[in-house]
Image: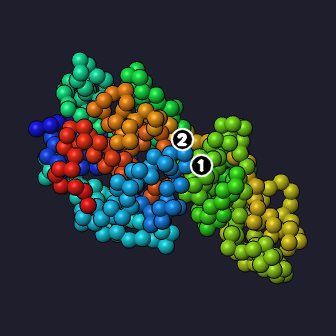
Amino acid sequence: MKIVHVIGAGPAGLMAAERLARNGVRVVVHEAMPSVARKFLMAGRGGLNLTHSEPMDGFVPRYSEAAPVVAGWLERFSPIRLIGWVEGLGQPTFTGSSGRVFPKTMKASPLLRAWLARLSDLGVAVRTRSRWIGRQDGGWVFAGPGGETVEQADVVVLAMGGASWPRLGSDGRWADELRSAGVEVAGFRPSNVGFNVDWSPVLIERFAGEPLKTIGLSHGGQSVRGDLMLTRYGLEGGAVYALSAALRDAIEQNGAAEMVVDLRPDLSIEALAARLTKPRGKDSVTNWLRKAGGLSPAAVGLLREIPGPIPEGADKLARRIKAVRLALTGVQGLERAISSAGGIRLDQVTDDLMLKALPGVFVAGEMLDWEAPTGGYLLQASFASGVVAAEGALDWLGLAGQGDPLP
């Protein structure tokens, strides 16, 4: 029986393990942490956004420069197939009003338990506290509680993640070992991350931790809608994450980036100005803006961050509300980023994700140099890359087209 070692027990690694085991391959999964899929479980705290229902002509461009490559992964394991796979594990899904797809439990743990039970039934062995530390005489060296061991394998699938949330296991320590083997690895950069803003002490004291709901953001010709969270250091949340790659690149090039916030994207300037003609009476400015302009106290606090008084004329005030210009002065680090850019350059792997420098070694997930916004796009591509790498491994072993395929 052929043996494949999968290194990394996140979504990509476990998906590769399942696809391989369904073909009768003996699979051993190594995980450096004491338990598997820690980052996957952390993502589930926000509801576990599995994928998105967006049509492919809008879905694929979310992967920016990597879109042509990721498109091939999605052809092999599409959002529809992912939903079928999840529901096959006894976890019904639903599509929210935003188009995002979630399990009905809104948790990762029930899905993971069902998945691990299936993998166990398929004979997959999972070894925790088993960290890959290098290669020796054609074998793969792992450090564990009992010391170092050298394992032989017919094929290896690498799925150790990128470098975000390193306390959960994705620390990027594998990069130097692969570089020494002739694999080009781009430096890691934070993605889906918060940005620094030089807030006034008043905003920090009163509004740090407060959300801005259903606002519009724009930068460099891109516009999105969503929610933001005001923090002591600046901003975070889904809306800014959608622009994070462009904002990060601008800050790296110029030292700062401008982002425009529309606090009432559902209203035109004219419609908002008409509402702001309502007399203020004895209301405070904050109460009047809440009643007439529909602004939360946190939104008013953001308006006050712009130098000078709040404009009095309805038209000028409406224009200010719909175009609050913020200077972003820095990017939060990898330790606070949801995901990372960088990793193994895509030209270093074949179409079926085998390393050109290391025949018989396949790669999946965030080890590869691609990025995407939150909204289900990250997990979808991670799962799909695991399928592609596993099927490439099966082809390498001469087992393609055999066994029980995934849903």
Q: Residue at x 19, y 27 (%)?
A: 151
Q: CA distance from mark 1 to mark 2?
A: 9 Å
Q: Position of residue 229 (x, y in %)?
A: 59, 57
- Is residue 194 visible in the rendered image? The answer is no
Q: How many marks?
A: 2
Picture disc at residue 45: none
Residue occupied by mark 1 = 244
Q: Which residue occupies the extreme top position in the image? A: 137
Identify the residue at the far right of this view: 313
Q: Residue furthest left?
A: 1
Regarding mark 1 in the picture, which secondary structure is present there? Answer: helix
Callout 2 amino acid: Pro
Q: Is residue 206 left or right of residue 189?
A: right
The residue indicated by pointer 2 is 190
Residue lying at 40% horizontally and 35% vertically, measured from the top left: 349
The kind of residue on which mark 1 rests is Ser
Binning the other alpha carbons within 10 Å of mark 2 as few (below 14), some (14 to 19) or many (20 upward) gives: many
Picture coordinates of residue 397, whole percent (x, y): 20, 38
| Residue drawn where x is 34% and y is 69% of the image | 93
**Where is residue 341 shown, x and y percent of the image?**
51, 41
Left or right: 256 in relation to 318: left
Q: Which quadrant would residue 267 be assigned to in this image? A: bottom right
Residue 12 lies, in percent from the top left, at 34, 46
Dot 2: element: strand
